[in-house]
Image: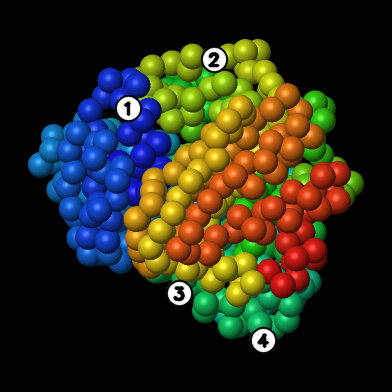
Amino acid sequence: MANRGEIALRIIRACRELEIETVAVYSEADRDAPYLQLADERVCIGPGPGIRSYLDIPKIISAAEITDVEAIHPGYGFLAENAHFAEVCQSCHIQFIGPTVENIRALGDKASARRLARELGIPVVPGSNSLLASEEEAVKVAQEIGYPVIIKATAGGGGRGMRVAHNDISLTSGYQQARREAENAFKNPDVYLEKYVEKPRHIEVQILADSYGEVIHLGERDCSLQRRHQKLIEECPSPAVDAALRARLGDAAITLARAVEYRNAGTVEFLLDRQGNFFFIEVNTRIQVEHPVTEMVTGIDLVKEQILIASGAPLRHAQKDVVLRGASIECRINAEDPSAGFKPVPGTITRFVPSGGPGVRVDTHVAAGYTIPPFYDSLIGKLIVHRENRDEAIATMRRALDEFVVEGVQTTIPLYREIFRHFHFIKGNLNTSFIEEYFLDA
């Protein structure tokens, strides 16, 4: 696992069920992480900062070679959508558990994915036709399509390398900020520009594809509740998507995947306006943080499917076999202070009591006594519920949030308790500005 935290643990568990031995790499900051003991082997790859450990390709490949691994799973974030890393794995005869190098270059690069979608007739948010070469070019494009606009890292993910601008001055500043953040997070400073669609829903479609040309979609996830363009709450299915719209979204996602002979898991992301029109924005050529809600509703283990597809196995499910049963919702439990602009609050967890009971799943790598490092994303766990319908899922999530105890650091749990009792959330009246609109102190 070329990753850390809850996704590394998730991969270890999937491998154990498939009777595959695992090697966990870790930084010095993660040396005492409890999940490392579940791996068959462990290799330290450097100091805490990601640039010196989890983003250091030579160190990761060296760890793989000395432990004689057959495959590397990149998880999400870090090098998960890095075409060069996938290419290095290939040249070292190590199977990259994810899309092909060509897939990542065509779709993981968000600017080229937009071009391809436009060529295929899939609706795309207006924006630059290629990567931006300068601040001046960014301003020129923005003036042509009209403000507000959003600068996005072409290799981005997790809300990093993104800035909204409402005029030339804020765009010039945002351009440089986005490039610096993208370079630090992904080792790629390239950015492009889109028209900023205000108050849309954020809808994404999960796809799976094998090496034999078969592609299926597993329905949609609604990821509209965000802060700083980073998702907080996700659900499947979306309360705004009916069967007809789901089919159209799925067809668009599959069309894009087939055009590049896509392989493995991926997510095609769209914005949905109030009139029900959807616009393609990007493809995430990796597993998503929010994959559990799709697993709960479809009954398909996405991480196992990734591993099996990478091993050369055909898809085990046809499109007709994919049935969405019930409703699932996920809350990302982050060590953050919502009242201080969601500022991360690393520290030591003194008490940790995850909730349980019928319909509840908790994916986490932490326990009481765990010290959250300051170098990485603030995610400490994911609380997922699955019930027969959305109303029941909301009721179960309320109960689960009330049971969940984390002491020693601040978390987003108190905010979620408020959200799940908010009239508009209960009614499914969601958009990407929901947090700013109804929780201004956050």
| Residue type for callout 2 | His
Q: Pinpoint residue 311: horizontal percent, then vertical percent.
A: 33, 23
Q: Is residue 367 left or right of residue 158?
A: left
| Residue type for callout 1 | Cys
Which residue is the site of mark 4?
A: 169
The colouring scheme, among rainbow, by chain, secondary structure or one colour, is: rainbow
In the picture, the disc for residue 317 is 2
Within 10 Å of the Cα at label 4, are there few (<14), some (14-19), or many (20+) other Cα atoms? Answer: few
* Residue 131 seen from this side: no
Which residue is the site of mark 3?
A: 180
| Residue type for callout 3 | Arg
Q: Pinpoint residue 324: horizontal percent, then vertical percent.
A: 68, 22
The single residue placed furthest to the left in the displayed view is 66
Location of the N terminus (image quadrant): top left
- In three-dimensional space, the C-alpha distance between marks 4 and 3, rounded to whole angstroms, equals 17 Å
- In three-dimensional space, the C-alpha distance between marks 3 and 1, rounded to whole angstroms, equals 36 Å
